[in-house]
Amino acid sequence: EGVSSYGDTGMMTAAIRRVPVGIRRKRLRIVVTGGAGFVGSHLVDKLIGRGDEVIVIDNFFTGRKENVMHHFGDSRFELIRHDVVEPILLEVDQIYHLACPASPVHYKYNPVKTIKTNVMGTLNMLGLAKRIGARFLLTSTSEVYGDPLEHPQKETYWGNVNPIGVRSCYDEGKRTAETLTMDYHRGADVEVRIARIFNTYGPRMCLDDGRVVSNFVAQAIRKQPLTVYGDGKQTRSFQYVADLVNGLMALMEGEHIGPFNLGNPGEFTMLELAQVVKETIDPSAVIEFRENTADDPHKRKPDISKAKDLLNWEPKVPLWEGLPLMVSDFQNRILNEEEGKGQ
Ligand code: NAD
Ligand code: UDP
Ligand code: UDP
């Protein structure tokens, strides 16, 4: 991939487009914090594939070296074990800031650490962006809408969030991260971008992160019952990871700050999702109901008109196409795990 695919994202100026074919645009140096995680590692693949240099910063809390190992030995790739809560000095053109545990099980494990990561981690990356004049992209979340009173959610909705609940370290943390991002933009002229990501799935999700898609897929493969929390009538909208990566890159290269909802508007109840997983992996799988967790949002569905209009982006992969794409990855990893136990 070279000049043409980069041009598609709309960043190149008319002047650069006149450069004869064969001469490449300047190679960018890009930091991806959380780049050894699920979303980050797919983003890194695409940036390296495009021809850029990538520095991954990760403390391996939920990320794994296995997710980026295929780039070891490539001179354009660098992996730094570092916690974003601590300052760091680097020289780069762009910062994709993803570092933060994303699944409820992981972010509730050490809530104080989660909020430190969101606040101090984001502050450090914004301080870095300010010092070197880099463009900064924050991966915020649909959780900033809380248990929404508006449906579907538009970016103009301010949200319905419990400030003292068990999810607050994450959703209030991300809200503060958005605030910091806008204050660095207004106060220090940092070029910023904000994405509000809705539930995303795909290969390399942690097997036991407790998120609903990874749970159902792993349970169906292990021949265990699919655990539906509550009555299973709550809804989510599930986006395939490749669609998200395209959206993040379109946002970074575009002219608009955001925030932008990045998600797939296809809305499913958890019972419907269980049905799709059954049909994809094992029609004989059984469903088991469990008590729901506290503060669970009842419904969630993005309004993505803003991203469609201004970023020319929309998701392409429906659930029934995306789910099979993560099944073989999960099957391999579960098999390895079982073989490991047998030794
Ligand atoms: P993930 O847990 O797979 O990845 C997060 C990565 O950040 C991991 O590699 C982890 O080790 C690293 N990390 C965590 N704390 C860190 C710290 N203090 N210093 C350095 N590294 C740290 O999660 P993901 O699904 O890939 O999510 C990536 C980003 O996207 C997160 O910011 C998350 O909030 C956001 N997001 C994801 C979803 C989704 O459905 N996957 C939805 C909304 C928002
Ligand atoms: N920071 C960093 N790398 C840099 C520049 C700043 O990690 O290259 C950190 C810095 O240590 C500080 C934060 O980013 O904790 C905010 O920096 P800023 O310069 O905005 O604020 P100040 O240092 O004046 O508090
Ligand atoms: N959920 C479920 N079974 C599971 C895990 C989760 O029914 O094994 C439900 C959960 O109660 C929530 C929805 O699935 O209503 C999405 O949960 P997840 O943790 O994946 O993401 P989030 O709540 O952050 O959207």
Image (cartoon, rainbow, N blue to C red):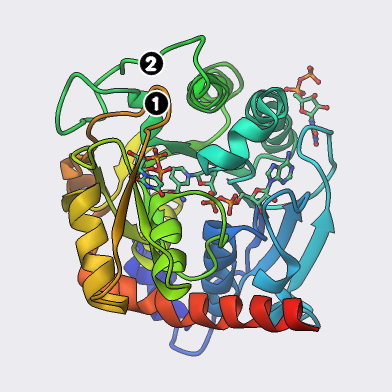
Label 1 packing within 10 angstroms: few (<14), some (14-19), many (20+): many
Task: Tell me what residue is drawn at x 60 percent, y 35 percent.
Answer: 107
Q: Does residue 64 appear in the picture of this structure?
A: yes
Residue that numbered label 1 is attached to: 144
In this image, 35 relative to 200: left or right?
Answer: right
The picture places residue 323, in percent across and down from the top left corner, at 32, 71
Quarter of the image where ligand 3 sits: top left
**Vertical placement of 333 versus 259: above or below?**
below
SS for dot 1 = helix
Residue 161, disc: 2
The picture places residue 285, in percent across and down from the top left corner, at 30, 69
**Vertical placement of 105 versus 28: above or below?**
above
Q: Amino acid at mark 1?
A: Val
Label 2 to label 1, Cα distance in Å? 7 Å
The picture places residue 311, in percent across and down from the top left corner, at 28, 51
2 and 1 marks in contact (CB < 8 Å): yes
